[in-house]
């Protein structure tokens, strides 16, 4: 028999080759995300004429010229777009409350206890929650603008 010799501490096994390659790929991908992009240079034939600059349609040009910057505590009604800017504050508030009620009921009715059955009407109803918030903000903007 051998005398009682102290045993060596268990060695840590090196990571597998696949893990090393995966970590290296992640490192390269994250480093390339912050690298400056070089402009792409296409091959242009001298036989091809250059395209004439395209004119923007009038509807797009008029929207580009509008500025959405405002000074003061609240924006003008024009930031709500062509439909909501004409709607009264009271109507937007009622529709916002209605959408909030439907969304909360749908989110509660389609909880995790009903899995694996998912009702599509409850999913659609739950998607009314963020719309109700947007209508609430639109109602506030219209109220502040006296509409």
Image: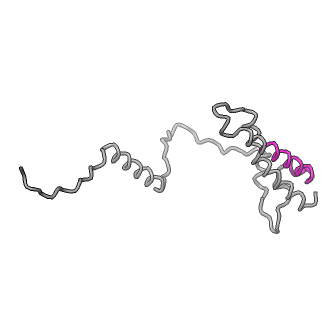
Give the residue at x 80% y 64%.
Answer: 70
Among the 4 quarters of the image, the one containing residue 49:
top right
Please name the colour scheme applied to the rendered image. Answer: one colour
Give the residue at x 82% y 67%.
Answer: 73
What residue span does the magenta drawing correspond to?
Answer: 82-103
The reply, left or right, for residue 100 in relation to residue 8 is: right
Check if residue 102 falls in the magenta segment: yes
The reply, left or right, for residue 56 in relation to residue 17 is: right
Up-down relation of residue 121 to residue 95 (above or below): above
Main SS, magenta residues: helix
The reply, left or right, for residue 7 in relation to residue 85 is: left
Residue 89: percent from left, percent from top: 91, 54
Give the residue at x 62% y 41%.
Answer: 51
Residue 138: percent from left, percent from top: 83, 54
Residue 86: percent from left, percent from top: 91, 50
Check if residue 33 falls in the magenta segment: no
Residue 17: percent from left, percent from top: 30, 44
Q: Is residue 62 visible?
A: no
Among the 4 quarters of the image, the one containing residue 114:
top right
The reply, left or right, for residue 87 in relation to residue 11 is: right
Q: Is residue 91 visible?
A: yes
User: In the picture, which quadrant includes the C terminus?
Assistant: bottom right
Give the residue at x 76% y 44%.
Answer: 57
The answer to which of 14 and 8 lies nearer the viewer is: 8
């Amino acid at each position: 028999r051998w005398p009682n010799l102290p045993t060596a501490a268990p060695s840590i096994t090196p990571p597998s080759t696949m893990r090393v390659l995966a970590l290296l790929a992640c490192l390269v991908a994250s480093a390339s995300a912050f690298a400056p992009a070089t402009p792409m240079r296409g091959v242009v034939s001298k036989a091809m004429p250059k395209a004439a600059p395209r004119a923007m349609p009038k509807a797009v040009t008029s929207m580009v010229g509008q500025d959405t910057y405002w000074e003061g505590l609240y924006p003008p009604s024009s930031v709500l777009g062509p439909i909501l800017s004409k709607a009264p504050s009271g109507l937007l508030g009622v529709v916002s409350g209605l959408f909030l009620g439907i969304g909360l009921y749908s989110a509660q009715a389609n909880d995790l206890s009903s899995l694996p059955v998912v009702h599509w009407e409850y999913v659609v109803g739950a998607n009314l929650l963020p719309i109700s918030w947007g209508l609430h903000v639109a109602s506030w903007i219209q109220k502040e603008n006296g509409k």
